[in-house]
Image: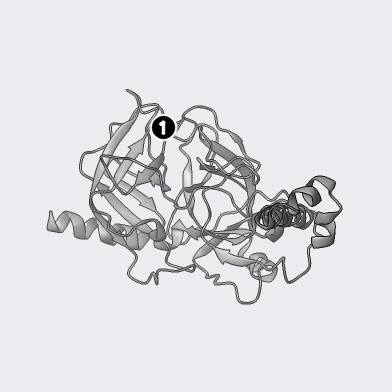
């Protein structure tokens, strides 16, 4: 790298006056080379060592998605830790006037969390949106706090949502139902892997369910995959490795019927462009009895 730097006359002249300037120039070159390596990695040219992939929580991205039609997903909500200063951290799904489901890894202390429904552009909180505060919540008791199964939480809002064309619930699947075919994800994540800022508007992507047996075969042997997960395909477009806000909805959409939430965005393999592997979601149908149990316990106590 030093020889490369000194082939640049401008850098050589400055280096005679300032050693620190040379170091800065070398740092720039190093960053440039790193960027070139990253670009090569996208093309599959990086070495196996540098291309190592690891399971992680999604970074809030719908890579290679498109902007959703305004209010196309009236069941999606934005979650934040602070009600007075709402700063989006995760997505969630309305399942009734008083209840939301999301990923367990999105929740630490549920009481006091902020929920905004009816959003399209994240910054446009207006007469169409409804903000609520969480007054009760439960993380699945078997969730260990890391990447893996039981990544589900249920939240109760202090004031019921008012359903209209901008705010509506998604339906739940039948207990232990296994789905197949086309699915949709929604989220406010970054629209491209090279754009580091979040999308201003709700993004969506259409993909396919990967049958569980096939997902087991595709993922690495040490993948923390469980029977209670559902996988979505990358379609060789790097869209599943980073798709969807954590906690957001994986849905089946059918004409003239409400969308059905079949999954909760849980974890993926990173780096996004290198992994090209299925994304893993919490399969909602595996937790129908658990959802009902928590709701019943809440109503008994309240």
Q: Nearer the viewer, residue 162 or 12?
A: 12
Examine the image and state in which quarter residue 66 appears: top right
Give coordinates of residue 120: x percent, y percent: 46, 30
Residue at 78 percent across and 67 percent down: it is 47
Q: How would you rate the neighbour count of disc 1 (Cα within 10 Å): few for under 14, some for 14-19, many for 20 or more?
A: many
Judging by the rendered image, the residue that carries numbered circle 1 is 119
Residue at 13 percent across and 58 percent down: it is 301
169 horizontally vs 219: left or right: left
Is residue 58 in view?
Answer: yes
Give coordinates of residue 10: x percent, y percent: 80, 45
Examine the image and state in which quarter residue 79 appears: top left
- Residue at the outermost right position: 7
Q: Say how the picture is coloured.
A: one colour
Is 9 placed above or below 160 here? below
Give coordinates of residue 86: x percent, y percent: 33, 40
Is 120 placed above or below 182 here? above
- Residue at the outermost front position: 17
Residue at 47 percent across and 52 percent down: it is 246
Is residue 1 in view?
Answer: no
Q: Nearer the viewer, residue 220 or 299?
A: 220
Q: Nearer the viewer, residue 196 or 69?
A: 196
Give coordinates of residue 248: x percent, y percent: 46, 48
Is 10 placed above or below 270 here? above
């Amino acid at each position: 790298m030093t020889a490369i730097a000194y082939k640049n006359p401008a850098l050589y002249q400055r280096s005679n006056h300032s050693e620190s300037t040379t170091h800065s120039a070398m740092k720039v070159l190093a960053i440039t080379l790193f960027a070139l390596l990253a670009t090569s990695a996208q093309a599959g040219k990086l070495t196996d060592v540098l291309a190592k992939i690891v399971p992680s929580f999604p970074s809030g991205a719908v890579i290679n998605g498109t902007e959703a039609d305004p209010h196309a997903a009236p069941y999606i909500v934005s979650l934040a830790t602070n009600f007075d200063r709402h700063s989006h951290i995760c997505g969630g799904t309305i399942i009734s006037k008083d209840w939301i489901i999301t990923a367990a890894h999105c929740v630490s202390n549920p009481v006091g969390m902020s929920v905004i429904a009816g959003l399209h552009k994240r910054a446009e909180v207006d007469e169409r949106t409804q903000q609520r505060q969480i007054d009760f919540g439960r993380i699945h008791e078997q969730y260990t706090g890391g990447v893996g199964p039981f990544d589900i939480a249920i939240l109760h809002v202090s004031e019921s949502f008012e359903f209209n064309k901008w705010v509506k619930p998604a339906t739940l699947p039948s207990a232990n139902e296994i789905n197949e075919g086309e699915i949709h994800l929604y989220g406010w994540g970054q629209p491209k892997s090279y754009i580091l800022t979040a999308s201003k508007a709700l993004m969506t992507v259409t993909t396919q369910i990967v049958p569980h047996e096939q997902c087991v075969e595709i993922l690495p042997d040490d993948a923390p995959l469980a029977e209670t997960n559902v996988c979505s395909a990358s379609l060789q477009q790097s869209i599943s490795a980073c798709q969807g806000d954590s906690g957001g909805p994986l849905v089946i959409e059918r004409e003239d019927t409400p969308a059905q939430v079949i999954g909760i965005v849980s974890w993926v393999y990173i780096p996004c462009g290198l992994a090209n592997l299925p994304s893993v979601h919490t399969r909602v149908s595996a937790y129908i009895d658990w959802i009902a149990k928590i709701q019943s316990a809440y109503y008994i106590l309240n």
